[in-house]
Amino acid sequence: LSLPDALPISSFLPIKGAVNCLSLLLQIAEQERTRGEDFLQQLSRISFQALRVDAVQRIQDITIGELLREKSADLLTAIIQFLNSALLFFRHDYFYNLNKSVLLGPKIYADGKSTLELAIAEYDQALLLDVTIKTLTMRNALPLPLEPSDKQKLSDLLMWLRSGPEVE
């Protein structure tokens, strides 16, 4: 068939538009599926962080630093914001509110996720700093070095231990 005998190209434009729309909807559906998997992964991270915070709070005889308390509160706030953004993102309906789902939904979810990741990283750093401070404080609380006479007694003891049992 030659082109003049076939349908004019302009008659294919509606079909091309329909195929492009279908392609866009399939792409959005795939993004939704991967975001659903990502959401489950983020829930797992949140559970792990909650266990860490709980473990720190269960220790009776330690003082938690102000920075760690602040970052714990920031982490809790970020978790709430992430869950809120996830609810906003996942509650939309393609046909009911297509504009929001295509344009704003992914940004809302991504913003909540990045806030959560930053809060987790800052909590990790605050916990590391608190542990470092506690460790250095404990190190400074160790007994002072031995006196010269104590060093001689320790040296004699070590030599006696190295000599081992006497074999007859």
Image: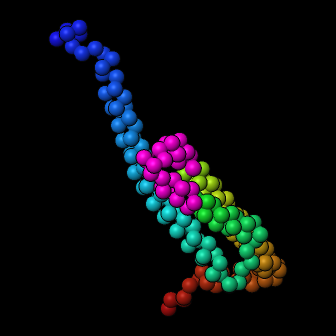
Position of 75 relative to 160 (above/below):
above
Residue closer to the observer: 10 or 112: 10
Is 82 displayed left or right of 5 in the figure?
A: right
Closest to the observer: 8 or 37? Answer: 8
Predominant SS of the magenta segment: helix
Q: Is residue 73 above or below residue 168?
A: above
Q: Within the magenta stretch, is there residue 84?
A: yes
Identify which residue is drawn at 48% across, 55% down.
Answer: 90
In this view of the protein, which residue sits in the foreground, 103 or 99?
A: 99
Work out whether 93 lies above or below 64. Answer: above
Q: Say left or right for 18 vs 75.
A: left
| Residue 131 coordinates in the image, percent (x, y) | 69, 69
Find residue 168 and report its horizontal and vertical position in percent.
Answer: 50, 91
Most distant residue in the left direction: 1
Number of labelled discs?
0
| Residue in the picture at 48% in, 56% down | 91
Residue 122, picture quadrant: bottom right
- Asked whether residue 65 is drawn in magenta, I would say no
Is any atom of residue 74 visible in this view? Answer: yes
Question: Residue at left 68%, top 63%?
Answer: 74
Q: Residue most toward the bottom?
A: 168
Residue 27, image quadrant: top left
- Tell me which corner region of the image, top left, top right, bottom left or bottom right, holds residue 164: bottom right
Left or right, 79 with respect to 131, comes to: left
In the picture shown, does residue 89 fall above or below 155?
Answer: above
| Residues drawn in magenta | 83-108
Q: Give the x, y percent position of residue 104.
A: 55, 45
Which quarter of the rendering shows the N terminus? top left
